[in-house]
Image (tube, rainbow, N blue to C red):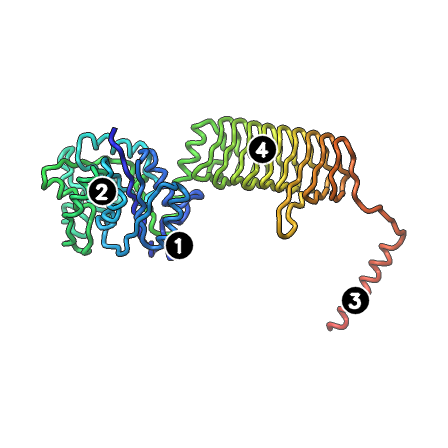
Amino acid sequence: MTEKALVILAAGKGTRMNSDLPKVLHPVAGAPLLVHAMKSGAMLEPARTVIVTGHGAEAVAKAASDWDEEAVSVLQEEQLGTAHAVAQARPALEGFEGDVFVLYGDTPFIRPETLEAMAEARLRHDVVVLGFEAADPGRYGRLLMQGEVLEKIVEFKDASEEERAITLCNSGVIAADAKVLFDLIDAVGCENAAGEYYLTDVVGLARARGLSATAVACPEEETMGINSRAELAQAEAAFQTRARAQAMEDGVTLTAPETVFFAHDTVVGRDTVIEPNVVFGSDVTVESEAHIRAFSHLEGCHVSRGGVIGPYARLRPGAELAEDVKVGNFVEIKAARIDRGAKVNHLSYIGDAEIGEETNVGAGTITCNYDGVFKHQTRIGARAFIGSNTMLVAPVSVGDDAMTGSGSVITQDVEPGALALARAKQVNKPGFARKLFEMLKARKAKATKEAQ
């Protein structure tokens, strides 16, 4: 089996983005464009991945290594064209024998099936280019085909009127044997309207040397390049449309699909129901038969089978929910494990905590986990009952089958089976409220008169 390597071009500044952030780091579905491109290429199981950086090189290299620690970044100090960019990857591919696939960091949606088709075509041809039938060819490079053979690629600036009438366009993605590719790049010149070294010239050079070239076609939406904020929004919309369709095909019920937003790595099990206006951040897994109610936001969390979340719930990173857990309206969970069958149904914050199975956490409960410097743990056992408006001042623990009285501020551990009451004794003063209101109204009247 032929080994494969990825070269991903990510050096562009992205002037039309009007941003200090490198273009390839702008996010779609919670991940940088570059990561989407790397994920697309990952299906090839590449032996090496090389990212060609330029503008914002340090940040781009970090994003690449955060996703794939084995990815190597190289710097293109001057942007002299795509062939010049690929040439910068040569040292990082020294000793590599196999096929090189050149992808683009701002073209995030190429499907695995498309790259598989290119890999298959490489078995029959020396150079394989990815093309698409453009609804509006515009300024794309044109693919000049003779049957299955790709004769050359003509950039729009250099194309004749007849060539501009061709609708089969170049995506820029190309695959070839490493030695062949770099030998052809060495022969690329810059005698063109832009004075750049075009990667597309390798096709004509290959044909002149008696090598074979072909094009594999894919749907135009796969080749969407992102160059502006408007196109970034279009890319987000395209991703969400595809993700929603895939979720429903996988057996997930979306009651209002157009209002649900997935992240690039969201996993949802079948027979789960997702109500309107639910947003998934990165790193979320929801198992089968869960119910995510309207206006909930989930990120960095795991919801087990049968969980019921929301409405208006927020699950933050580190929220780990066992089977049949219920998290209700206006509840926030962060860095906490909630065991099987536990309930946190109303207006509560549970952070840096462990809650045992079948425990009920009453409305308005807060784990006071932060002392201004350090975070501390709260541990609540199984089958406990936490009364409404309980403040649990961590570090603190409540044992199995224990109970706290409503309105308590718990600062000491509660032993299993105990009832903890920690609130001031109520004192009623007859008539005092009426006197207090009269005094306050008199003060307000005086202040109003003095202001006139």
Give the residue furthest to the front: 95
User: Tag 2, which secondary structure?
Assistant: strand
- Residues 251 and 87: in front is 87
- Who comes first in sequence, dot 4 or dot 1? 1
For label 2, count other residues whose C-alpha is less than 10 Å away and answer few (under 14), some (14-19) or many (20+).
Answer: many
Looking at the picture, which amino acid does disc 4 mark? Leu
Specify the amino acid type for callout 2. Answer: Cys
* Distance of label 2 from label 1 (alpha carbons): 29 Å
Q: CA distance from mark 4 to mark 1?
A: 36 Å
> Can residue 422 be seen?
yes
Residue 235, percent from left and from top:
38, 44
> Mark number for residue 445?
3
Q: Amino acid at mark 1?
A: Leu
CA gap, disc 3 and disc 1 = 56 Å
**Which residue lies under the disc numbered 1?**
21
Q: Which mark is residue 150?
A: none
| Mark 1 secondary-structure assignment | loop
Circle nearer the viewer, 3 or 1: 1
Position of 133 with respect to 289 (left or right) is: left
